Image (tube, rainbow, N blue to C red):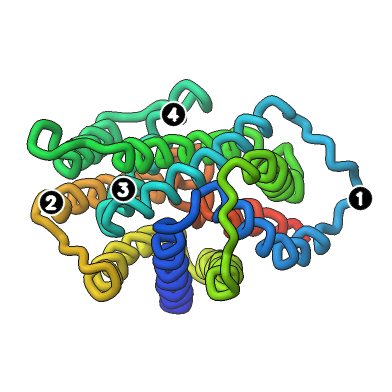
Amino acid sequence: MNIKGLLFALLGFAMFSVHDVVVKYLGSSYSPVQIIFFAGLFSFPLLTFVLMSDPTRENLRPVHPWWVSVRVFGALGAGLLAFYAFSVLPLAQTYTLLFAAPILITVLAIPMLGESVGPHRWAAVLIGLLGVIVVLRPGAQELTLGHAAALGSAFCNALSSVVVRKIGKEERTVVLLLYPLAGNFILMGLALPFVYVPMPMLDLGGLGIMALLGFTASMCVIAAYRFGEAAIVAPMQYSQIIWATFFGFLLFGESLDRPTISGAGLIILSGLYIVYRESRGGKSSNTPVLRNRSRGYSPGSLRTSAILKRWKSD
């Protein structure tokens, strides 16, 4: 069964990588606000079919409105900042910094969830932070808004994930999925008139492809978690580094420098060890850090833990 889960995961994250290639292409001409608004708009019909299948008959008022609001703004911040980072940084470097999210989840889980982190996971966190420093090379290269945006997206993604871990057992799946969509439509729609640039049909088609890729990739990752163990499936997201290197070189003329390779290795090693420790049982009373969501910054992606929870309850 793990082989099937592994293959679904590799396919899903490969499609997410193509999704991000489209983001980078469109990001050279359009604001992240415009890209996210239309990507979310095109994703909504696809996601509606998932939301309509919710069997419970209750209202859509959240049990924890404050925490749901934090999750909404966290998801929106993660998307805006990640899309900007993709538009100005090399693909592989952007992924490397976004992969700091599991490290930040581990840290945020202490004050927000009351979790205790032992010396092994603290060591993994410190190794991951060292990897971030290696990638950024403060003093050796100019730090740009793109670097800050990538790290800011990782933080927002971590915050949103920890909120779901905190309230996920009490909030309905449809609430956790619908409110970020509504927030995207309302807030990005309000900002859109200030940044809107007319789009030709080719670029609108690119947004449609983004929506389809994000949704299909999410379903593949969800299937991967149904057929495979989280400790096997979750690390497959790091395969995106390989795709980023390939697409970055082929389409954008990007090269992978030694500090980015070294820093990525440290960050990936840190994330793998955190997953390993949590998969041993009893290390975390909540969902493993890399299982909460396949993507925290794509409007068309689905939260894997929420969908799996609903399917298990059917």
Q: Which residue corresponds to mark 2?
A: 262
- Cβ–Cβ below 8 Å for labels 2 and 1? no
Q: Earlier in the sequence, mark 3 or mark 4?
A: 4
- What residue is at 86 percent from the left and 52 percent from the top? 56
Marks 3/2: CA–CA distance: 14 Å
Residue 136 figure quarter = top left
Q: Which residue corresponds to mark 1?
A: 57
- For residue 271, which numbered disc appears in the image? 3
Marks 3/4: CA–CA distance: 15 Å
Secondary structure at badge 2 equals helix
Query: What amino acid type is highlighted by mark number 1?
Result: Arg
Query: What amino acid type is highlighted by mark number 2?
Result: Ser
- Cβ–Cβ below 8 Å for labels 1 and 4? no
Query: What amino acid type is highlighted by mark number 3?
Result: Gly
Question: Percent from the top left, x then y, of residue 164?
Answer: 60, 39
Estimate how packed mark 4 is, as few (under 14), some (14 to 19) or many (20 or more) residues with alpha carbons within 10 Å: some
Q: Establish if 111 lies above or below 305.
A: above
Marks 1/4: CA–CA distance: 33 Å
Q: Which residue corresponds to mark 4?
A: 108
Do we see residue 296 in this rendering?
no
Q: Earlier in the sequence, mark 3 or mark 2?
A: 2
Query: What amino acid type is highlighted by mark number 4?
Result: Leu
Do we see residue 117 in this rendering?
yes
- For the residue pair 264 and 2, the one nearer the viewer reads as 264
Q: Establish if 146 lies above or below 64.
A: below
Q: Earlier in the sequence, mark 1 or mark 4?
A: 1
